[in-house]
Image: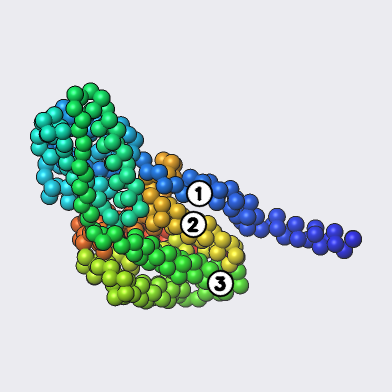
């Protein structure tokens, strides 16, 4: 028993000495419960929409007010024509547009019937389906209220126009997410583990005393994984286009440039993780908890951000995956160009620069 007590004592000393691993092990269950509990939801709140009200009468305004008051929708634009609706989908990030026809109130009172047109962004199939159901629920409630105050019964016809994914193909939603995950796993995870291994084995200290600039050492360690990630991305794109018939509506060069910028950001995130890690295990656990899980849960890839509490929507902004998925969907599905996604590119590039500067400063202190 004495020998067992000594071994147990030794192991606990080792565990408490490695504070990073201990903190990760203790924090992981709490983080997982919070992330999965708050992010996995099919409810969507305050989805951005546009309303083209061609009638502008009392009943059309009442309907718009009920849409806003439902909590499901946030009207961010009142376009004057359908061309402006197209701009709203690209530049204002709306998920849905509603067109109220002329003579809306007159058609209800005289003919007992009116038609609404709903235009959906079906690049995210799940979100489009949920928002369609919300629209129908609000219209049914409005119809019931109207009929209670009317001498005759009225009804609505809702026509749906599907943009960017008219065949409702689910691959449109998964391909951008898969590309993102591959880049995170290959570029960030392997880069962080490689650099952490150099530090753990002591070879990083030897490299830093050689007559080679520090930035060249780091870049030389990271570039091979970026090349592997880039090859994997091209393979995914080829399979998506040839097998699953997914279009690339935007510029192929713009798409590849976007992927390179994101790979740089992912690699710099891996450098950041390795700079605060003591061992390869620490680097792997921090990457999985600090980058891989947020990529899956907080990027809008699987679960809509609008359904999450505000704190998680704000938190999602600090992870590169959110901005990359927004940009790659715009380029591949919506055919957006540089001036449509420049802000996303700028955010990713600034993140990369900040991560690199911080990582190099930490490397100086640790080595």
Residue 235 position, x and y percent, is 35, 76
Q: Which residue is mark 1?
A: 35
Tell me if mark 1 has few (under 14), some (14-19) or many (20+) residues whose alpha carbon lies within 10 angstroms of its own: some
Tell me if mark 2 has few (under 14), some (14-19) or many (20+) residues whose alpha carbon lies within 10 angstroms of its own: some
Residue farthest front in this picture? 152
Q: Which residue is mark 3?
A: 198
User: Quick one: 223 or 111, which is closer to the camera?
Assistant: 111
Q: CA distance from mark 3 to mark 1?
A: 32 Å
On the rendered structure, is 168 left or right of 355? left
Q: Are discs 2 and 1 less than 8 Å apart at CB? A: yes
The reply to whether residue 157 is in sight is yes
The reply to whether residue 216 is in sight is no
Residue appearing at x 70%, y 58% in the figure: 15
The circle on residue 293 is 2
Residue 297 position, x and y percent, is 45, 53
Secondary structure of the residue carrying tag 1 is helix
Q: Looking at the image, is 190 positioned above or below residue 316?
A: below
User: Quick one: 258 or 72, which is closer to the camera?
Assistant: 72
Residue 51 position, x and y percent, is 19, 40
Q: CA distance from mark 3 to mark 2?
A: 25 Å
């Amino acid at each position: 028993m004495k020998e067992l007590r000594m071994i147990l004592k030794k192991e606990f000393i080792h565990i408490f000495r490695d504070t990073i691993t201990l903190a990760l092990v203790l924090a992981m269950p709490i983080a997982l419960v919070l992330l999965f509990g708050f992010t996995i939801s099919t409810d969507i709140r305050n989805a951005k929409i546009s309303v083209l009200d061609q009638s502008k009468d009392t009943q059309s305004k009442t309907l718009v007010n009920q849409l806003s008051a439902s909590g499901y929708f946030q009207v961010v634009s009142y376009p004057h024509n359908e061309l402006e609706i197209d701009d709203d989908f690209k530049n204002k990030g709306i998920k849905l547009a509603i067109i109220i026809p002329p003579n809306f109130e007159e058609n209800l009172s005289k003919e007992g019937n009116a038609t609404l047109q709903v235009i959906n962004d079906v690049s995210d199939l799940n979100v489009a389906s949920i928002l369609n159901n919300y629209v129908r629920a609000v219209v049914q409630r409005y119809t019931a209220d109207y009929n209670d105050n009317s001498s005759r019964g009225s009804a609505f016809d809702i026509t749906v126009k599907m943009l960017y994914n008219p065949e409702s193909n689910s691959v449109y939603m998964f391909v951008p997410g898969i590309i993102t995950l591959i880049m995170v796993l290959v570029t960030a995870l392997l880069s962080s583990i490689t650099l952490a291994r150099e530090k753990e084995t002591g070879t990083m200290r030897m490299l830093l005393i050689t007559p080679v600039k520090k930035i060249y050492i780091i870049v030389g360690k990271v570039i091979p994984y970026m090349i592997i990630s880039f090859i994997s991305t091209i393979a995914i794109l080829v399979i998506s286009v040839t097998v699953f018939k997914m279009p690339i509506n935007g510029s192929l060069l713009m798409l590849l440039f976007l992927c390179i910028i994101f790979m740089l950001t992912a690699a710099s995130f891996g450098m950041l993780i390795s700079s605060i890690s003591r061992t390869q295990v620490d680097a792997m656990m921090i990457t999985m908890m600090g980058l891989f899980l947020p990529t899956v849960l907080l990027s809008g890839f699987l679960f809509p951000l609008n359904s999450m509490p505000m704190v998680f929507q704000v938190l999602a902004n600090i992870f590169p995956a959110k901005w990359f998925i927004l940009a790659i969907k715009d380029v591949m599905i919506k055919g957006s160009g540089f001036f449509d996604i420049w802000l996303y590119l700028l955010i990713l590039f600034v993140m990369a620069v900040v991560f690199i500067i911080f990582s190099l400063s930490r490397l100086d202190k640790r080595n």
